[in-house]
Image (cartoon, coloured by chain):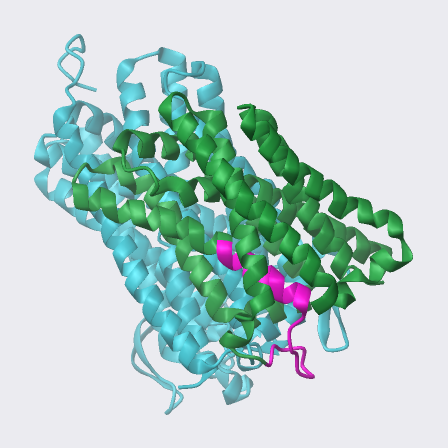
Chain colours: A cyan, B green
Amino acid sequence: MDSVFLARIQFALTIGFHYIFPPLTIGLSWLIVWFMTKYKNTGEDRYREISYFWLKIFGLSFVIGVATGITMEFQFGTNWSEYSRFVGDIFGAPLAAEGIFAFFLESTFLSILLLGWNRISVKVHWFSSIMVAFGSTLSGFWIIVANSWQQTPAGYKLVNNRAELTDFWAAVFNPSTMPRFLHSIDGALMTGAFFMLGISAWQILKGLRVDLAKETMKVSLILALVSSIIQFGLGHYHAVQVTKTQPEKLAAFEGVFETQRRAPALIFGIPDAEGEKMNLAVRIPGLLSLMAHGDINAEIKGLKDFPKDEWPPLEITFYTFHMMVGLGTFFFALAAFGLFLLYKGKLYDNKLFLNIAFWTIPLSFIANQLGWISAEVGRQPWIVYHILKTSDAVSVSVPPFQILLTIILFLIIYSGLFFVWIFLLRHELHSLKLSKPAVDEKGGNA
Amino acid sequence: MSTLQVTWFFLIGVLFTGYAVLDGFDLGVGFWYLFTKKNKERKALIKSIAPFWDGNEVWLLAGGGALFAAFPHVYATVFSGFYLALMLVLYALIFRAVSIECRDKLTSPSWVKFWDYAFSFGSILPALLFGVALGNILRGIPLDKGMNFSGSFFTLLNPYALLIGLLGLFMISTHGALYIAMKNEGELVSKARRWARISWYIYMFLFILATIITPFTQPHLLRNYEGTPFLWSVPILTLMSIALIGFFNKYGEDFKGFIVSSISIVGHFSMVGLGLFHI
């Protein structure tokens, strides 16, 4: 096995594991802000209890996100040294900015938030929750800036075979930054919302603090619905940008081989990269042209317009993209069904909905992973689009067996972390058994 | 170097110095952690750093990011060249972060024991390896034409680098013991003062040893001192601040001890900067 392959496996493994946590914590942080605000305004005990409980879940997930995040910053230097030499001036800047501006904010206010109960005023505590949510969102911004620059590089010039920064703001707001940031942050809100929804459903099914679960269920359901609806728009906005800036990626997403006007949208199909065709394709004529360009007669570039050795790996890009879109549609349908039940006053009694909501938790994480895979695999064979190939970016001084060794160690450690995370989540949830609702509430009906 | 590069050189120095002073004390707490067997004291130790450790680690992330941005070749060469060592540091930091969060979630003895060891070794390993890495950078590492490290993992384990590694470890253990003494009450304080004392002797000894050996084995680090003898005040002040740690420790002035210990760390990094800086 060669270094490039191994380094890619290691990167995929470590980023995939890391990316379980940031979307969850970003989403939950804004939900916690909501409940902290309610507590500040009403002083009601149940809001305090909800915030307290969910902050514990948040803190647990946050720390694993931090711990696995350090890996990412190290890894560009350890495994991708030639990439680091090539883009350091540009790529390092947002990473440093994330550390200095965003992460510092988060970690300072997180300590206040987690340890501040009964020690600081409600207002300061509430303010800390906002700063944590703001800080983690800002963190996400800088990371997406760095990654988007790989997709659509801007604000640089090539000097001595290295990319040098010429315009900081052009690099920061490169063509894909905003579409990708908004798409990912909304994905994070969806993750937080469906996570809270699923846990609340589980609480109701198990009869654990149903009084609190009804409140969290209602709020998370509304966020789930709103963020799922917005995601259709943001996903579209992002796809339009990909059409303009990375046409071969869009062609791989949609399985378009021939450049054509009135390009159809694919409902179903099995891509065949060897035979350069789609099998069992079910298409809606003109829809892709219409969606991508707002014009049914617009031209969509097909893969055959590009050298075959510069095609993204077709199957992975195609399947992950379509599964993500499918899941997004399912999330919307589930949330809409939930809202209908809420409107009918049957939300908390519908066993079917509650069970589906619980089992949707892993799906929301999977959707994030799928989106990320289709975005990154769809960029291949480039590490920086049309400038530097992934195969030229890997560290030359690291022997393959050392990478293999660290992959194995990462696998062991990260599996351990994953089980510890699940185990402690369960532990926190079961600890709800010990807590009792306040008696002065009117029967716990939210 | 251009003015911009000199500014970055200084700024990155500030970030790594800040990291050593700040994360140094919580790594140092981890060093002493297994020296007490009492669960109550271990809990107190964790509690004393729980609100700060991740804020402190931000300095490492910021320093690494700044190095990546300002001196990408240094970042690329060092991080890929020290591959296995840095991966070890990484695993240690991961275990350490998680152990602080997890240890007191359950009361089962084997659970607590596992995270106790993870926390302590997760602190000692980075404290030692950061010093070894710095020792190698001071000493110089073999590079090929593509600016890539051409040695092996064992090239890095040379006596000089190991000496600097130990110096760093005891600098941090002294710093941590002083922090424990400053932040706690009762029996733990007298324990921590004893720890600080023992650790300080070794710190002082290793500093003097390294200062005597360096001019003979690494003469290139003295370039800047030769032109500007005034710079000798930096090692002298560093030595004085280390000596003052012992003085304050003797009279139970833990806070002052912690301050001079911090100054001694700044002194060390200034010496590193003066040794490496080259127009």
Is B168 above or below relative to A39?
Answer: below
Q: Residue at x 35, y 41 (%)?
A: B35
Where does the magenta region start and end?
B128-150
Q: Residue at x 69, y 43 (%)?
A: B239
Please indicate whether residue A108 sits to the left or right of residue A409 in the image: right
Q: Residue at x 13, y 32 (%)?
A: A204
Percent from the top left, x then y, of residue A301?
Answer: 53, 77
In which image quadrant can residue A87 be found?
A: bottom right
In which image quadrant can residue A387 be found?
A: bottom right
Q: Residue at x 70, y 58 (%)?
A: B212
**Viewer-nearest residue: B19 or B203:** B203
Image quadrant where one finds the N terminus of chain A: bottom left
Magenta span contains residue A320: no
Which residue is at the far top? A440
Say if residue A335 shows up in the picture.
yes
Percent from the top left, x then y, of residue A236?
Answer: 46, 56
Which residue is at the far bottom? A275
**Viewer-nearest residue: B201 or A237:** B201
Magenta span contains residue B130: yes
**Viewer-nearest residue: B98 or A213:** B98
Say if residue A147 shows up in the picture.
no
Please indicate whether residue A169 sits to the left or right of residue A72 in the image: right
